[in-house]
Image (tube, rainbow, N blue to C red):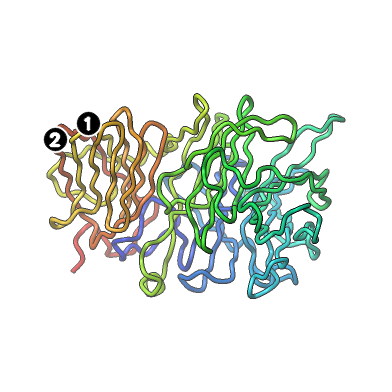
């Protein structure tokens, strides 16, 4: 049954994924199986605030409609009594299994995190359910001295991939993001013949990110083997909070990662904790968390918090990361639009923005989003942020979904938030800027009585 959402709040997206209620953050356990894209996510179903994490779950065939599923993981073992935190979905022997971070201490003290597994069942309709956590953790925070010369301040968020062993048998590789007092953020690499027995291979990357600042802690670190190239993505923390997402490209020599370059995966700090997975057509799809800018009390009162980004097709071209919105989103397009007409805040726009040109999405005379073209780059301004996106070709694609704004140019992206007061807007182009665009259909059914009209 297609999922519905309360869309009475004009800031709530209608075609980006949001949780039914409460708090959503990291996408975890992404995968495609049996004709479905499965999306698990960090979830507090009780209130729209960060608290003891569960795993929410949904699935979609093509990102144009969604089905919600029952909670996949709830705290319940001694190792996860303070939350089931980020991790991955893998299949071992055909069994869908969630591999996740459990936290046992309410203050999240160093050493209280562990890696846990929860096997489940695939139903005849392709649904994934019945996940039950193993009573024992399968991997624990490293003992003192186990990682020579380093004092760990953080250790979490397992991601996995399968590799061919020297004897022809497959092995798992598990990456955990860390923070260290000596070198800042990094990632450790483990190997295992199965999901319950692991050995530490060493640091995959530490205190270095191809010229980018590694920050203090890496979260949701994931190593992607792309054949001739490899990519490590990691979300950087600084001062106890999120500070953007890194993409480090290079090559794999066995288990050694040789860095070529580092760059922002997204040019805004609001895109965080992404995860990638293989989709039909050998595509690599990436989905991230779009963070909030609303005050905490407003989020709590509204009953919802957080959204997932659009799925992005991601690859390495000429040594750098290249990402574009997934092709499935084209089927959401409804009708063509023109500057000056009154439009819903659900738009897919192809823009041409030369130097000196500008483009504005406004509401009642106030800008929701403003783009200004400069030589080789574009400035994007919303009520909360100003970011600059390299754009040597002056061609951009802008996706608007209520408060969520995603801009793509020359394979790069910037993800922002704005603050609409109702669900209508107008477009204005000047200085040689041009626009071709479409309204988009919602991916969620609306609350009865809700329509695209200004709020009273």
- Which structural element holds mark 2? loop
Q: Please give the label number shown on residue 431.
A: 2
- If you read the primary sequence from the N terminus, does the residue marked by circle 1 or circle 2 appear first? 1
Q: Do the residues labelled 1 and 2 touch (CB within 8 Å)?
A: yes
Residue placed most toward the observer, 406 or 58: 406
Quadrant of the image for the C terminus?
Answer: bottom left
Residue 187 percent across, percent down from the top left: 66, 48
Whether residue 220 sits left or right of residue 397 in the image: it is: right
Residue 454 percent across, percent down from the top left: 19, 62
- Which structural element holds mark 1? loop
Q: Name the residue under label 1.
A: 354
Whether residue 422 sits left or right of residue 47 in the image: it is: left
Residue placed most toward the observer, 380 or 149: 149
- Mark 1 Cα shell of 10 Å, populated few (<14), some (14-19), many (≥20): many
- Mark 2 Cα shell of 10 Å, populated few (<14), some (14-19), many (≥20): some
Whether residue 319 sits left or right of residue 115 in the image: it is: left
Residue 367 percent across, percent down from the top left: 20, 53
């Amino acid at each position: 049954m297609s999922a519905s959402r309360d869309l009475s709040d004009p800031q709530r997206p209608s075609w980006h994924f949001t949780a039914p209620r409460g708090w959503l953050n990291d996408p975890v356990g992404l995968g495609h199986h049996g004709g479905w894209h499965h999306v698990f996510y960090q979830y507090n179903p009780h209130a729209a605030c960060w608290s003891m994490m569960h795993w929410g779950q949904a699935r979609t065939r093509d990102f144009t409609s969604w089905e919600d599923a029952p909670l996949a993981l709830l705290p319940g073992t001694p190792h996860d009594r303070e939350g089931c935190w980020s991790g991955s979905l893998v299949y071992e022997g055909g069994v869908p299994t969630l591999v996740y971070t459990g936290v046992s201490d309410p203050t999240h003290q160093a050493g209280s995190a562990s890696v846990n597994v929860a096997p489940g069942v695939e139903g005849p309709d392709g649904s994934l359910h019945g996940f039950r956590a193993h009573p024992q953790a399968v991997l624990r925070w490293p003992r003192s001295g186990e990682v020579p010369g380093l004092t760990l301040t953080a250790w979490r968020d397992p991601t996995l991939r399968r590799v061919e062993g020297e004897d022809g048998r497959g092995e798992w590789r598990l990456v955990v993001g860390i923070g260290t007092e000596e070198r800042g953020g990094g990632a450790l690499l483990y190997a295992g013949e199965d999901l319950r027995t692991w050995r530490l291979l060493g640091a995959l990357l530490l205190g270095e990110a191809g010229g980018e600042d590694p920050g203090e802690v890496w979260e949701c670190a994931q190593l992607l083997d792309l054949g001739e190239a490899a990519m490590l993505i990691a979300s950087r923390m600084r001062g106890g909070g999120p500070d953007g997402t890194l993409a480090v490209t290079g090559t794999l020599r066995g288990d050694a990662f040789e860095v070529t370059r580092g760059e922002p995966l997204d040019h805004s700090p609001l895109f965080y904790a992404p995860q990638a997975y293989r989709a039909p057509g050998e595509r690599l799809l990436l989905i991230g968390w779009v963070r909030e800018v609303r005050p905490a009390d407003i989020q709590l009162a509204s009953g919802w918090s957080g959204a997932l980004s659009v799925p992005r097709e991601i690859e390495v071209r000429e040594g750098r990361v290249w990402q574009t919105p997934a092709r499935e989103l084209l089927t959401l397009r409804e009708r063509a639009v023109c500057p000056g007409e009154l439009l819903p805040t659900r738009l897919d726009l192809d823009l041409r923005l030369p130097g000196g040109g500008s483009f504005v999405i406004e509401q009642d005379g106030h800008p929701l989003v403003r783009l200004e073209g400069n030589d080789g780059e574009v400035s994007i301004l919303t009520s909360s942020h100003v970011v600059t996106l390299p754009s040597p070709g002056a061609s951009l694609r802008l996706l608007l979904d209520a408060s969520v704004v995603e801009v793509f140019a020359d394979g790069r992206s910037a993800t922002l938030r704005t603050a609409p007061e109702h669900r209508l807007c107008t477009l204005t182009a000047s200085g040689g800027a041009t626009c071709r665009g479409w309204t988009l259909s919602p991916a969620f059914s609306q609350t009865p009585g809700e329509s695209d009209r200004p709020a009273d």
